[in-house]
Image (spheres, helix red, strand yellow):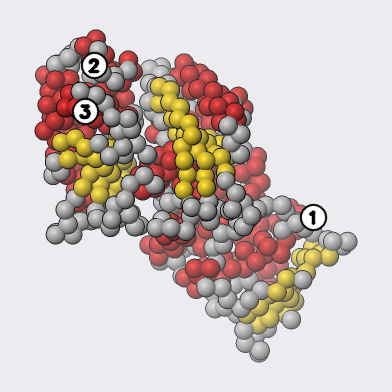
Amino acid sequence: MVESPASIPRTLAYPNRFDPESAQRDRIIAAIDVGTNSIHMVVVKIQPQLPAFTIIDREKETVRLGNFSAQTGGLAEEAMARAIKSLKRCRAIAESFRAEEILAVATSATREAANGNAFLERVEQEVGLSLNLISGTEEARRIYLGVLSGMEFHRRPHAIIDIGGGSTELILGTGEPHRFLSSTKVGAVRLTGQLVTTNPISDSEFTYLSAYVRGRIEPAVEDLKRHLQPEEQLRLVGTSGTIECLAALVAHERLGFVPDPLNGFQMSLSELQDWVERLRHMTYTERLALPEMSARRAEIIVAGAVILQNAMEMLGVETLTVCERALREGVVVDWMITRGLIENRMQFQSSVRERNVLNTAQKYRVSGEHSDRVAQYAVELFDATQGHLHQWGNAERQLLWTAAILHNCGHFISHSSHHKHSYYLIRNGELLGYTEVEIEVIANIARYHRKSLPKKKHENYRNLPTKYHRQVVSHLSALLRVAVALDRRGVGAIAQIYYDFDETNRVLSLRLKPALTHDDCASELWNLEDKKQWLEELFEIQVVAALA
């Protein structure tokens, strides 16, 4: 028998369980960033007692996933083949280090490609890796975590710029919770493919390229600047291969050698401007002859340099500091945080999911008391039936909590069909801390808290990538339906719930203690009769409810 407390504080409703023993031993994991231009991997040794991690291996391969097929507009077959070959190699290397887990994320190119999901499925089948698609804003958040793992900001405002193949991320933070995150669809590969046809680049193409970049990044730059206080002086940190390459050119000319590592190296805006002028007048062959310049980088360096120059000029900064940690290290930090392995200056990030969910609920004017109760009931029911009706773990429990908090957000648009509106708002809300697939799952769970059951003819249900995800939605939406029924009037009529499961007869009993002794909770019991049917059908059980 499981007894529930009368209420759970909002900050405690979203649990973070982890094994204390695992928090003591050293761990080895690998993190892979599948970008538009390159695939990067780091293999790290995590020392939870410090807490810190040490990079024990780095791998990088330029696969140009962002070179879309001219015929289909999606990922080209050759690019996907290169990526899969590279990922197989990454997996083999990670396993040679005995990595206990391989974390892999995909960004801009896979996000935008019409066949992006098909590519994810191929990676799963051919490589045996689960490649998690993340939004541009979530990519920016994890870049922030990666940079913080390698630099101290001393509570002073720092802008971070990461120039990728398909997008550029701009971030503002002080080492505490980020102030601003953005992702703009300008990247070195994207711009080179769209706007550069001459070699060296012609004056007219260069002028248009600069104007285009300025126009595209200006909204993000201006928005970032609005998050600064008038007296604050902004510092700039740069990550990514493009920025490291430009810094290497500056260092080689200034010092006669390229520092290794480049982390912490500073270059001035005037030095960058000088190199942009030189690079734009060079042919591809001349650029390739420069120190630290690879063949693939020589193709896209002009576009990347133009992005950086315009960003520095618009931000009004004269110096950039290089940070060699970025998205892949941020993936590692995020993994440590979600497992409770970090208790230092980044501890605030441990609640990033919860805080973002509650902020989203507030944005869409969700009733806090009602959503809290529904989330409480849903999580309690999950716990009471775990091991009896299902074997889901903490990850799925967290998705249920999120869906329960946001299940009614569709009322922000309209009461009619609000469950469908909830799906739309959640799906397009870019919840921080979640992958694209997790957001899709959360949105579907909320979508099916009422009315029709999950069906393959529904496009949103078909969008779920695997049978596992569809099963999660079916099971958790059934639990959510019962939780919603238990607060039918939205007044907290039920103070306490007692659960008991009879394994022999497969009967789940709910004894409900009313908040008011004279209340017969008829509305809740009546609604439960309707909402319990999906749970009974799925698990082949009988649900019996009565007042305690």
Give how far apart the Cα atoms at labels 3 and 2 are.
Answer: 12 Å
Residues at discs 3 and 2 in contact (Cβ within 8 Å): no
Give how far apart the Cα atoms at labels 3 and 1 are.
Answer: 69 Å
Instruction: Name the kind of residue labelled 3 in the image.
Output: Ala
- The circle drawn on residue 400 is none
Q: Residue at x 16, y 30 (%)?
A: 272
Q: Residue at x 13, y 41 (%)?
A: 318
In the image, residue 477 sits, relative to residue 289, either above or below, namely below
Q: Earlier in the sequence, mark 3 or mark 1?
A: 3
- The circle drawn on residue 251 is 3
Instruction: Name the kind of residue labelled 2 in the image.
Output: Leu
Quadrant position of residue 176:
bottom left
Residue identifier under label 2: 290
Describe the element under mark 1 as helix, strand or loop. loop
Q: Position of residue 373 (x, y in %)?
A: 56, 71
Instruction: Decide: few, some or many residues near mark 1? Use Cα within 10 Å; few <14, some 14-19, many ≥20.
Output: few
Q: Earlier in the sequence, mark 3 or mark 2?
A: 3
Quadrant position of residue 304:
top left
Residue identifier under label 1: 540
